[in-house]
């Protein structure tokens, strides 16, 4: 029995084993007739052989006529949305969108290797070998049809990881990655999705930035002295007599290099990746200048973070350390790395960090990150240079990033001004 006919479609009551249910019937954009079962109807048999509304409040799991029309409208809209997906893409899974998104990042956006590596870690498939992976995103959405993932699915996922012992920033990173994947899937040359289900979710409020940690110049000198003395290396377990003079000479060169690396980092503000990719062709000792022209990213040479070259004045302390380093017997040509392993290859990022921590411990200096050497440069440079000059030397893309160091700029008249206020 047809209860009603509306422009969107017809709402029909059918019975199965004596139980009535509502069914939607309509023609789609291609004029193909479609049917969808909506749910059990809140009806009872009528004496004339038809159906009439039951008395009382509609119980959960049942639909009255008003609710049935709303459900029919939702189902028709959902089917129409599926029809807008490019032919052949309706069976696409979430991981298909992830794979195409990675291609977009690597070849169109030219993302750096370290950026790609970070995203691959976040979007790793669950595995059984090696270290247990969190794989939060792929555990949740892997294997799901791309077009079937809803805003409610994303909201439930974010709400669940909200309760994990992770920061709001980490939750927001998961949200941002999902948003980017679905936004790319909306392109007509990918999956042609009509909507981005992440757009309807909310960004989590994050804590403010932590105070910048810096070193005193005397602390950097003490750390470099500890490295030069080899105090930052783990005991080898062998006595001095076991090592040949050649080996001892190489160990001392490695120690001197670490000392120079720490000094140059603090005096130039170069990022770790920029230091590891620095070649002698980038160093102008006569002109007291160093050029940041490239960076190591996930073990590969790439452009700097800003994708621009930038010159940085070379303080005498850094220039002196580099002159001493250039006296080594090998790896002094223009194309050689300034800071390298005994075979000439770039230093390992993780190893540098570990030796830096041990050098601080040996120097009896409070341990801070290697990146805080860069913060030290910014905080000291702002005392003598204007904001724009510091921004250019540090390679910041936005002036607001450089403004973080303004707290370090001394204003000797502040105390006097406050004193006058409270007189």
Image (cartoon, helix red, strand yellow):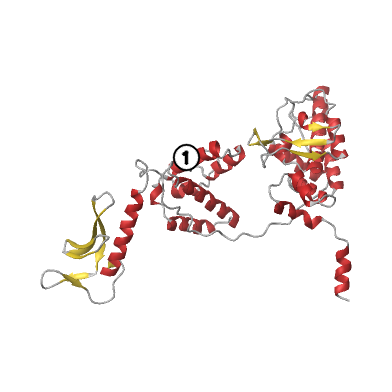
- Left-right relation of 142 to 368: left
Among the 4 quarters of the image, the one containing residue 168: bottom right
Residue 203 percent location from the top left of the image: 55, 58
Residue 188: x and y in percent read 43, 44
The image quadrant that residue 65 belongs to is bottom left
Residue 186 in the image: above or below residue 41:
above
Q: In the picture provided, is 247 more to the left or to the right than 163?
A: right
Residue 298 percent across, percent down from the top left: 63, 36
- Residue 22 in percent (x, y) is at 23, 63
Task: Name which quarter of the figure residue 95 lies in.
Answer: top left
The residue drawn where x is 29% and y is 75% is 57
Task: Tell me if I can see residue 417 in this picture.
Answer: yes
Q: Determine which residue is flagged by label 1.
A: 100
Q: Is residue 234 visible?
A: no
For the point 52% across and 56% down, which residue is it? Answer: 161
Q: Residue at x 79, y 41 (%)?
A: 268
Residue 196 or residue 238, whichever sits in front: 196
């Amino acid at each position: 029995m047809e209860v009603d006919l509306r422009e969107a479609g017809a709402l029909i009551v059918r019975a199965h084993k004596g139980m009535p249910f509502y069914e939607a019937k309509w023609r789609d954009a291609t004029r193909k007739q479609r049917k969808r079962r909506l749910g059990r109807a809140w009806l009872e048999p009528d004496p004339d052989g038809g159906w009439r509304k039951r008395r009382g409040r509609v119980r959960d799991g049942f639909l009255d006529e008003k609710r049935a029309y709303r459900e029919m409208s939702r189902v028709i809209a959902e089917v129409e949305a599926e029809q807008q997906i490019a032919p052949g893409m309706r069976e696409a899974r979430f991981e298909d969108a992830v794979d195409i998104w990675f291609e977009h990042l690597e070849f169109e956006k030219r993302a750096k290797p370290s950026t790609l590596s970070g995203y691959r870690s976040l979007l790793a498939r669950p595995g059984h070998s090696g270290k247990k992976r969190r794989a939060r995103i792929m555990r949740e959405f892997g294997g799901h049809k791309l077009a079937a993932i809803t805003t409610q699915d994303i909201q439930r996922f974010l709400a669940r990881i909200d309760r994990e012992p992770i920061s709001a920033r980490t939750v927001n990173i998961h949200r941002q990655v999902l948003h980017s994947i679905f936004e790319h899937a909306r392109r007509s040359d990918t999956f042609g999705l009509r909507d981005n289900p992440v757009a309807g979710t909310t960004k989590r409020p994050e804590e403010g930035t932590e105070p910048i940690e810096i070193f005193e110049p005397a602390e950097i000198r003490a750390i470099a002295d500890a490295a030069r003395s080899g105090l930052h290396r783990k005991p080898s377990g062998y006595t001095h007599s076991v090592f040949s003079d050649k080996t001892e000479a190489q160990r001392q060169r490695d120690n001197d290099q670490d000392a120079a690396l720490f000094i140059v980092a603090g005096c130039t503000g170069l990022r770790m990746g920029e230091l590891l990719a620095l070649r002698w062709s980038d160093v102008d000792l006569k002109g007291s200048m160093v050029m940041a022209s490239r960076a190591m990213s996930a073990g590969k040479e790439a452009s700097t973070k800003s994708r621009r070259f930038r010159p940085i004045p070379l303080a005498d302390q850094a220039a002196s350390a580099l002159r001493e380093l250039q006296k080594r017997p090998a790896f002094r040509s223009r194309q050689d790395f300034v800071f390298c392993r005994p075979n000439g290859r770039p230093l390992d990022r993780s190893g540098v960090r570990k030796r830096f921590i041990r050098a601080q411990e040996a120097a009896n200096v409070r341990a801070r990150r290697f990146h805080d050497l860069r913060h030290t440069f910014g905080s000291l440079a702002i005392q003598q240079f204007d904001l724009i000059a510091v921004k250019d030397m540090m390679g910041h893309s936005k002036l607001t990033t450089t403004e973080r160091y303004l707290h370090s700029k001394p204003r000797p008249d502040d105390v006097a001004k406050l004193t006058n206020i409270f007189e």
